[in-house]
Image: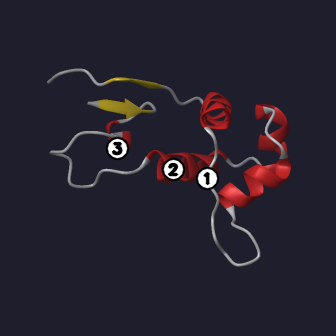
Amino acid sequence: MYWIGNSERYIINDMADKQRQSMTEILREAFHADGRSIYQMGRDADIPYPALYRFIKGDKTGRKWSLNLITVEKLAEALGLELRPRKKA
């Protein structure tokens, strides 16, 4: 079982958790809660604006793009999130 972030609501792989979120959902939610613009987040995380924009907002057709693992790592770092084993109850 792994989780990302500082809260139990960010559980990734706990099959017992009925409200499990994907890592993509967590990153988008954390971005919106952060309050920085796409441009500022891109600068802070060293992520190209177009890539971050397509991930957060989508392209002209509305399709949201994915990020590669290196970019996810940069975004998570900028948002103060980390991936680590979940503590056993």
Establish if 89 lies above or below 27: above
Residue 85 drawn at (x, y percent): 33, 22
Where is residue 6? Give x, y as percent: 43, 30
Q: Are marks 1 and 2 in contact (CB under 8 Å)?
A: yes
Question: Is there a contact, CB below 8 Å, between mark 3 and mark 1?
Answer: no
Q: How packed is label 2: few (under 14 Cα within 10 Å), some, or many (20 or more)?
A: some
Mark 3 or mark 1, whichever is nearer to me: 1
Q: Earlier in the sequence, mark 3 or mark 1?
A: 3
CA–CA distance in space, label 1 to label 2? 8 Å
Q: Residue 24 carries which label?
A: 2
The residue closer to the viewer here, 24 or 43, is: 24
Q: Which residue is drawn at 19% across and 44% down?
A: 15
Labels 3, 2: front one:
2
Residue at the location (20% across, 54% down)? 18
CA distance separating discs 3 and 1: 22 Å
Where is residue 66? Give x, y as percent. Answer: 61, 53
Q: Which of marks 1 and 2 is in front?
A: 1
Say left or right for 7 vs 31: left
Sequence-earlier tag: 1 or 2: 2
Mark 2: amino acid: Thr
Q: Name the residue under label 3.
A: 9
Q: What element carries label 1?
A: loop
66 above or below 61? above
Q: Which of 54 and 20 is in front in this view?
A: 54
User: Which numbered dot is residue 53?
Assistant: none
Q: Name the kind of residue labelled 1 in the image.
A: Ser
Q: Mark 3 near mark 2, Cβ–Cβ under 8 Å? A: no
Q: Which residue lies furthest to the bottom in this view?
A: 61
Name the residue tied to disc 1.
66
The answer to whether 75 appears left or right of 14 in the picture is right
Which of the 4 image quarters holds residue 34? top right
Mark 3 and mark 2: Cα distance apart in space? 14 Å
